[in-house]
Amino acid sequence: MGVEAHRELLESIDVDVDRHAKMMAAGFEGYKNQFMSQENRPEGMKYFDWLMSEMQGERIAEINELRKAKKPAVGTFCIFVPEEIVTGAGGACYGLCGGSPATIADAETELPRNICPLIKSAHGFKLQRTCAYTQSADFIYGETTCEAKKKSWEILSKHHPVHVMNIPHMKREKDLRMWKEEIGDFKKHIEEVTGKPLSLEEMKEGTRIINEKREALLRLDALRGMHPEIMPISGKDALFVIQMGFLDDPVRYTKKVNELCDELEQRVKDKMSVFKEDTPRLMILGTPFAIPNWKLHNAVENTGGAVINEESCIGHRYFKDNVDLEGVSDEDTFLERLMERYSKIDCACFTPNTPRTDKIVQMYKDRQADGVIYYTLSFCHTYNVEAHLVTEALEKEGIPCLVIESDYSPEDAGQIKTRVEAFLESISFKKKAAAFKNK
Amino acid sequence: MGVEAHRELLESIDVDVDRHAKMMAAGFEGYKNQFMSQENRPEGMKYFDWLMSEMQGERIAEINELRKAKKPAVGTFCIFVPEEIVTGAGGACYGLCGGSPATIADAETELPRNICPLIKSAHGFKLQRTCAYTQSADFIYGETTCEAKKKSWEILSKHHPVHVMNIPHMKREKDLRMWKEEIGDFKKHIEEVTGKPLSLEEMKEGTRIINEKREALLRLDALRGMHPEIMPISGKDALFVIQMGFLDDPVRYTKKVNELCDELEQRVKDKMSVFKEDTPRLMILGTPFAIPNWKLHNAVENTGGAVINEESCIGHRYFKDNVDLEGVSDEDTFLERLMERYSKIDCACFTPNTPRTDKIVQMYKDRQADGVIYYTLSFCHTYNVEAHLVTEALEKEGIPCLVIESDYSPEDAGQIKTRVEAFLESISFKKKAAAFKNK
């Protein structure tokens, strides 16, 4: 494994190397069991398998090489970070560890038990010093999208530099104006880290790189979900590819995702599906899945279903919109375009957030899906309250919907599996009844 | 009771009168048992006892008389509402019902179980049509201070007109600029309701009225808490007086609070305390107590302690700051002064919110209190996370602190009582040890 080879580097960034190595070994073991055991996986997944083994090794070495060259390393927890700017500055912008139950007990020495597990897990990784990404970050990019995070930064900032961006919770003209200012401030902060001005051309180049990454992910999303009879990749593998998009070098990553997509395209032509005919095809809506939170995907795909899309932040919400660079020739226009792109994000932090519901119904129709699971991380008030509005709209459309709220503990895995199984059965029954009626 | 006398009016504003009458009767019965049974109560509490019996009767009639005269009736859940403006327009600005467990099951048909009980209770009152204040409101004033509320407005607005003000979560110059705009928008909205322009003089007059109310409450706060040996009023009675400040006509209310304070002043001179010597004197920090949520005060005062201050929104946070009208001769300056006043509120929604911690320590010293209880309504992430920072600071100062998180269910009342009792015992022990050492 890649971690041992980088012991010296990991020590230099104050990782608790022994504990880290143990966690990574367990993580890779879990990955082997849950992912590499799947049948008929695309060849293109080999790169991502390698990345799994090197994500806390070789990739960390790359990031620290950039840092040596005075490039910024920015750790994030949210898709509101303008990664185009960090990429333009030649730096690395990545998602921090936050999907493991193994760090939560430590976090609960400083944070309440009844807040979102993602926040607690991430906080615990910092306290344990077991995430090499956190340890490599020049600063952690926080935002005000959810109140538990917003308040946790105040405690986290005692342990690591945190920069907080104020994301407005409405999208009126005056809110958007302020948002644009925030993006401008972020750019200035990056310039402070690198100690040199960032040019419009650099930022546009960074934007092109990220635009291409998002396009590759949209391509993957279409290939896995838009062909009702053929699913050329499992939902689990597709999710893992998306998760890696928050860690990998964007240029290499885009190339690898596109290579995988070429293969999937061929599979679609060859009608080669990794699921048997009539497998119920589900969309998952809601909150993000951070590595190694694969609980729900396992529940679905181990009980006869397939996940064809995640409408979440680690998913479609992340890559659905691109920055329009057409005719951008000054910084003000560039910042305006960034703001326009970011304000399209339909996070439940916004009030109102009705475009999200309309989008979900459209996505469902586009994919001819068979049902949706509305997934909320425990105690995530925004997505949890919004569930009522979304499920109401889905019901009106006759779309089968299961609502699941869960944290990272393995304790409810059995219960979730049982609920998913019953949901899949009811979908299959309806499909068969419909097919019988149409005969 | 006053409710029956107003049956026709209550029906006309679509109150479920029979259910409402039953709830009010039970509420008044509870009040009699918990409040009117206390010994040696000030004479001045008689007015507030009357108000308790008439708060959903005579007071509702008054509000609806104002409405007939085209004055605005604004229902709120938060102390960020610029009530000066509503009062200036001759209308009524009041807090909506939200402290009862009896409406929560109804709310949970539309809202998640694991959000704040205040939000659920208030939502349930609307669904049940058992709060005459909600039914009388031209609109409900919502804000974005907490995410569960922010998202609940989207559902509540299906049942009642809701106007939402975007309160920023930082206090940088640009945030304050936006805040001022929001206050200006609020004024315009009130003008829309009344159909006529609101003059600067009217708004200044409204401000004088509310300033005087806050001054009276500050006076009460000092009288109950600033004389270590004499507590001329119980914490429960003082809390109830404050709670009534969110419902009553402000001019009459101020007069009655000042009359009560005159009496308390005399009691202080006469060394007449409602608690025996050496009763541990506690401050309560945190989230608001809406009527009839008297659980914690009962737990403290029935087990040998006294509550001398609530640092909460229904408490000191509400009345600690006044609007400076000195030299205000144009609307822009007036809005600026309102913004300055409102931005002093140290709600846990702000990041950072360090002035709150400093204030708490100072308040504790000013009152020579014996300990504090940090109280959080369940699932209130902002106050819950901030508890860590506040208790850390209190510990450094050697201030005894008990943290309690609770909802409205009666189920944990016994457990809370046990914890409070142990806390009071440890405080008494420390006091005696200190006295012995000083001999």
Image (cartoon, coloured by chain):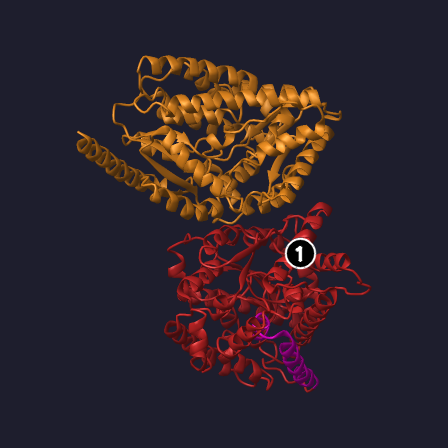
Chain colours: A red, B orange
Image location (x, y in percent) of residue B351: 53, 47
Residue at left offset 66%, top offset 56%: A183
Residue nearer the viewer, B262 or B97: B262
Query: Foreground residue, B387 or B131?
Result: B387
Q: Looking at the picture, does residue B27 appear above or below residue A231?
A: above
**Residue A266 on the magenta segment:** yes
Q: If the image is split into quadrants, where does the N terminus of chain A sit?
A: bottom left
Residue under the point 59% across and 20% down: B209
Residue for point 38% across, 29% down: B366
> Tag 1: residue type?
Ile
Residue B414 placement: quadrant: top left
Tell me: residue A165, above or below residue A313: above
Question: A385 or B201: nearer the eye?
Answer: B201
Task: Please tell me which residue is depicted at 27% across the width and 28% down the height of the picture.
Answer: B279
- Number of residue marks: 1
Question: Magenta residues: mostly which secondary structure?
Answer: helix
Percent x, y of residue A282? 60, 68
Q: Residues within 10 Å of mark 1 (few under 14, many from 20)?
A: many
Coordinates of residue B113 in the picture (x, y in percent): 48, 48
Name the residue furthest right.
Answer: A327
Residue A59: say if magenta.
Answer: no
A82 or B398, nearer to the observer: B398
Q: Is residue A226 visible?
A: no
Secondary structure beneath label 1: helix
Residue designated by label 1: A183
Report the span colored magenta.
A240-269
* Chain letter belonging to callout 1: A
Relative placement, left or right, of A377 versus A274 is left
Quarter of the image with the C terminus of chain A is: bottom right
How far across and how far down the image is residue B4, in percent?
Answer: 52, 20
Quick check: can you spot residue B123? Answer: yes
